[in-house]
Amino acid sequence: MHRRGVLLPLPTPFAGDAVAPARLAAAIGRYEAHGVSGYLVLGSTGEAALLDEDEKVALLVAARAAIPAAT
């Protein structure tokens, strides 16, 4: 697989002390309008080490649902 374009690292959104998967999905929806090539969720912004497995899964599920399938 050869990727071209921008691979965007996404910070994890929070609402108070809880992760906010809906906010992550909304952000991805906005980025999709600008031709982003891909996303890095739970990666380079550092907070993933502090999240439990349920929080991580919720964010990944929300991200996958917000990203259109490759054509």
Image (tube, rainbow, N blue to C red):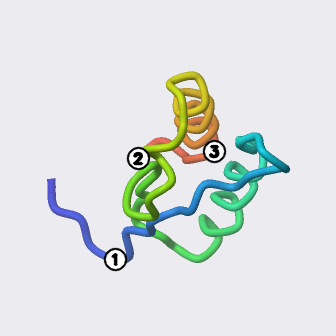
Q: For this view, does 27 lie left or right of residue 68?
A: right
Q: Residue at x 60, y 54 (%)?
A: 12
Residue 50 circle label: none
Residue that carries the numbered disc 3 in the rendered image: 66
Q: Amino acid at mark 2?
A: Ala
Judged from the image, the secondary structure of the residue bearing numbered disc 1 is loop
Q: CA distance from mark 3 to mark 1?
A: 19 Å
Local crowd size for mark 1, using a 10 Å CA cut-off: few (<14), some (14–19), many (≥20)? few
Judged from the image, the secondary structure of the residue bearing numbered disc 3 is helix
Local crowd size for mark 2, using a 10 Å CA cut-off: few (<14), some (14–19), many (≥20)? few
Q: Amino acid at mark 1?
A: Gly
Residue furthest out toward the top: 54
Q: CA distance from mark 1 to mark 2?
A: 14 Å
Residue 5 circle label: 1
Q: Is residue 70 above or below residue 45?
A: above
- The image quarter in which residue 57 lies: top right
- The image quarter in which residue 62 lies: top right
- For the residues labelled 1 and 2, say whether their Cβ atoms are less than 8 Å apart: no
Judged from the image, the secondary structure of the residue bearing numbered disc 2 is loop
Q: Amino acid at mark 3?
A: Ala
Q: Is residue 13 above or below residue 5?
A: above
- For the residues labelled 3 and 2, say whether their Cβ atoms are less than 8 Å apart: no
- Look at discs 1 and 2 and give the one toward the viewer: 1
Q: For this view, does 21 lie left or right of residue 3?
A: right
Q: 11 or 3: nearer the eye?
A: 11
Residue that carries the numbered disc 2 in the rendered image: 70
Q: Position of residue 36 (x, y in %)?
A: 48, 70
Q: Residue at x 70, y 67 (%)?
A: 30
Residue furthest out toward the right: 16
